[in-house]
Image (tube, rainbow, N blue to C red):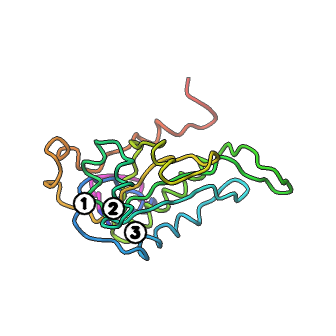
Amino acid sequence: MTNAPERATAPSVNRLFVDRWSPRAFAPDTLDAQTLLGFLEAGRWAPSAYNSQPWRFFYALRGTPAWSSFLSWLIPFNQSWAGNAAALVFVASRNTMVPPEATDPVDAPTHAYDTGAAAVQVMLQATHEGWAAHAMSGIDAAAAHAGLKLGADVTVLTAIAIGKQGDKGTLPEYLQGREAPSDRLPLEQVAFEGGAPA
């Protein structure tokens, strides 16, 4: 597991949540499919509205035929570092569901929220097993949607680069200074009893 000792939190918080961060420097280690599927298995157990399980994970391992396509669906900035990762996982979500006792699909208003929960569980499992995971919003969602041959009821939300954390010296110079765990807002700025502050 990566370690972020400078990040302070309440003693009751499991260090897994605090030690997870999003590096861009990856070592040349490879990742086998079974290990990656173990990370995705953790995501499979996420909660969702009506247990609709809207998440879909599409992956490519570095060095496999699909790798260049998956990498091309990232914006150029992310391609510049994510190409060194061991795996890329595109996370998509079904935006409709069939509720209990219904036969026709309806809009799934929480599909992205539910799929986000699944993606976090994937990243936490990877962290737990000593791998680094970096989720990216900088993707060409339309190109990924077309390349993955997804239906109209599926939305591509993000991509996750997974690999062993590497030396920041392998990054372009302008990224090396950013290669450190970021902090978070204090709890009192994000949690409020009874409503928003005046």
Task: Return the disc, 1 or 2, that comes first in the chain's sequence.
Answer: 1
Q: Specify start and end residues of the magenta stretch as a single range.
A: 3-11
Label 3's element?
helix
User: Which of these two is toward me, 56 or 48?
Assistant: 56
Question: What amino acid does circle 3 point to?
Answer: His
Locate residue 105, reporting x and y percent.
Answer: 77, 49
Locate residue 191, reporting x and y percent.
Answer: 53, 40
Residue 125 is labelled as none
In reply to whether residue 4 is colored magenta, the answer given is yes
In reply to whether residue 100 is colored magenta, the answer given is no
Q: Residue at x 40, y 66 (%)?
A: 126
Task: Return the disc, 3 or 1, that comes first in the chain's sequence.
Answer: 1
Q: Are marks 1 and 2 in contact (CB under 8 Å)?
A: yes
Label 2's element?
strand
The residue carrying mark 3 is 128
The residue carrying mark 1 is 26
The residue carrying mark 2 is 132
Q: Is residue 153 above or below residue 15?
A: above
Placement of the C terminus among the 4 image quadrants: top right
Locate residue 130, reporting x and y percent.
Answer: 33, 69
Mark 3 or mark 1: which is in front?
A: 1
